[in-house]
Image (cartoon, helix red, strand yellow):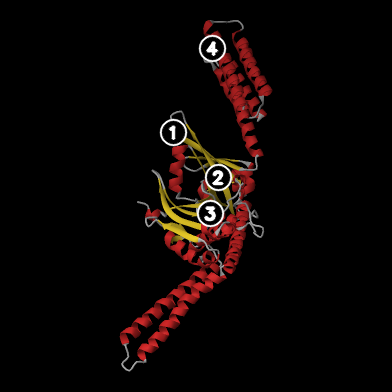
Amino acid sequence: MLAMATALATAIFIIDTISPLDMAIAVLYVIVVLFSATYLERRGLLLTGAACIGLTVLSFTIMHSENYNLSSTMRGVVSVAAITVTTLLSLKNQHATRALREQADLLDLTHDAIFVRTVDDIITYWNHGAEELYGWTRAQAVGQRASALLHTVFPEPQQDIFEQFQRAGRWEGELVHTTREGASVVVMSRWSLQRDERGRPLAAMETNSDITERKRAENALHQSQAELAHVTRITTMGELTASIAHEINQPLAAVVTNGEACLRWLGRAIPDLGEAKSAVEQMIRNGRRASDVVARLRALARRGEADRVPVDVNEAMNDALLLVERELSNHRVALDLSLDRGVPRVLGDRVQLQQVVINLALNAIQAMAAVPAARRRLRVETRRLADASASAVQIRIADTGPGVEPENIPLLFNAFYSTKSDGMGMGLSISRSIIEAHNGLVAATLNEGGGMCFSVTLPMHEETRP
C-alpha cells in the first residue's frame, strides 16, 4: 500500500515537473492523500499531506525558478489548498470513523445478540454476541435477510408486528429463532427504529437476549404447579367425601324408589302403563343425574393440560357448589346465592375454575366455625363488570367469620402461609396461579360487618363481546 502511494506520488511529481501544460496537475496529489487515509493513522496522514505539499512546492520551484507569473503561482496555491483541505477532511473522517468503530466495539462487549437491518430486513451489522448465539460469522450474516436467515417465528402475524413497529418506533416481545446448527432459541427481542430528518424509516436495531433456559424453567415450574394443583384437587375431594356420597346416593335412591313404584303399577290386575312409564322416565332422569355427578368427579380428578373453552360461569358455579352442600349442612352455614343471569361466558378451563370456587368456599365455611351458628352466612354472587373499554365477569365469595388482621391480607396468597393451624397454605396460592393463568385477578378484602370477601375477576370471552 505504501509502495503504491509512493509510486503514484512520484508519477504525479514527474508529470507536474516536466509537463508543458499550464494545468494544476499537482491537484492530483489529493488522490495520494485519500488513498493513504485508508491505511495510515493521523501522524502518517499528516506526513503524507506535508510530503505532497512539499513535492508541489519543489516542482513549482523547478519549473518557475526563473519565470514567476501570476497564473502559475495561483495554480500552485490552488494545488496546495486542495491538498491541505483534503488532508484535514480525511483526518476528520478518520476521527468520526474511529468513534463509530469504538462504539461498535462496545456493542461487541455485550452478551446480547445485536444486529442492524434495513427497512427491507437486510442485515448491515452483526455483533460478536450474535455470532456466539446464532453461529454465523459477521461476514456470513451481513447482506442476508434477517427473518429468512434466522427462520423467525413471530408471536403475531409478521405484517401486524411490522406495522406496529413503524408506528411506535419500537417493539418488544418473544421470538423463536433457529441457529446455524438447527437448534431453536427463544429470545426476548427489543427493536428500535432509526428515522431520517424527514421521519422516514432508515434502519432497525434489534437486541436479542437468550431466554431459552428461563422459558424451560418456567415450563417446568408450570408443570410442577399443575401437579400440585392436581394433588390439591384430590385432597379437596377427600375432604368432600360425605358430600360426594350424598350427591350420588340421592339419584340412586330415587332410581330404586321409582323402580319399585313401576313394579307396583305393572303388578296391578290392570297395569297402569301411564304411571309405569312416568316412573321409568324418572328413573332415567335420576340415572343421568348420577352419571353427571360421576362425570364431574372424574373431571376434578383428571390429570392433564388445561382445556380452554368458553365456560358458563353460573353453570360452573352451581356444579361446584353442589359438592359443598354437605359441608354447608355440617357446619350449619346458610348460603346466599345471587347469580347474574346476564354474565357472559369466559374462556378458560372449567375444572380449574371450579377448583378455585371450591377452595374459596371451603375456606369461608371453615373460617366461620368460631362464630355462632346464627351468624354463619356464605354469600356467593356473580356479576358483570363493564366500562368504556372492556368487560369482565366477577365472582364474589364472602363469609361472616372473624377475618384476618389487615396487615396479613397481602400474605394470604403466599405459598405455605395459612391462618389455620392444620393448613398447608397452598389452596389460595394455587387459586391465584390458576386465575392469573386465565388473565384474571383474585383479591381479598375485609367486609365492613366482619369476615372476608374474595373476588375473582375474569375477562369475558371475545366471541361474547357486543
User: Is residue 250 shown above or below 51?
Assistant: below
Specify the farthest residue to the bottom. Answer: 269
Q: Earlier in the sequence, mark 4 or mark 2?
A: 4
Residue at the far right in the pictured view: 43
Instruction: Give amino acid for label 4.
Output: Arg
Left or right of 277 in this view: 406: right
Q: CA distance from mark 2 to mark 1?
A: 23 Å
Q: Are marks 2 and 1 in contact (CB under 8 Å)?
A: no
Q: Is residue 78 visible?
A: yes
- The type of residue carrying mark 3 is Thr
**Distance CA(mark 1)–CA(mark 3):** 63 Å
As drawn, the label of residue 189 is 2
Q: Does residue 375 sit above or below 40 in this rendering?
A: below
The secondary structure type at the circle numbered 3 is: loop
Dot 2 and dot 3 residues touching (CB under 8 Å): no
| Residue type of the residue flagged with mark 2 | Ser
Q: Give the number of the mark in front: 4 or 2.
A: 2
Q: Residues within 10 Å of mark 1 (few under 14, many from 20)?
A: few
**Which labelled disc corresponds to residue 75?**
4
Per the image, label 4 sits on a secondary structure element best described as helix
- Tell me the SS state at disc 1: loop
Counting other residues with Cα less than 10 Å from the Cα at mark 4, is it few (<14), some (14-19), or many (20 or more)?
A: some
- Counting from the top left corner in percent of width and height, residue 399 is at 52, 55
- In the figure, is residue 43 to the left or right of 431? right
Query: Crowdedness of circle 3 by 10 Å Cα count: few (<14), some, many (20+)?
Result: many
Residue to which mark 1 is pinned:
200
**Disc number lying in front (1 or 3):** 3
Closer to the N terminus: mark 1 or mark 3? 1
Q: Nearer the viewer, mark 1 or mark 4?
A: 1
Which residue carries the number 3 mark? 400
> Mark 1 to mark 4: distance in Å?
45 Å
Query: Which residue is at 66% across, 38% downward?
Result: 109
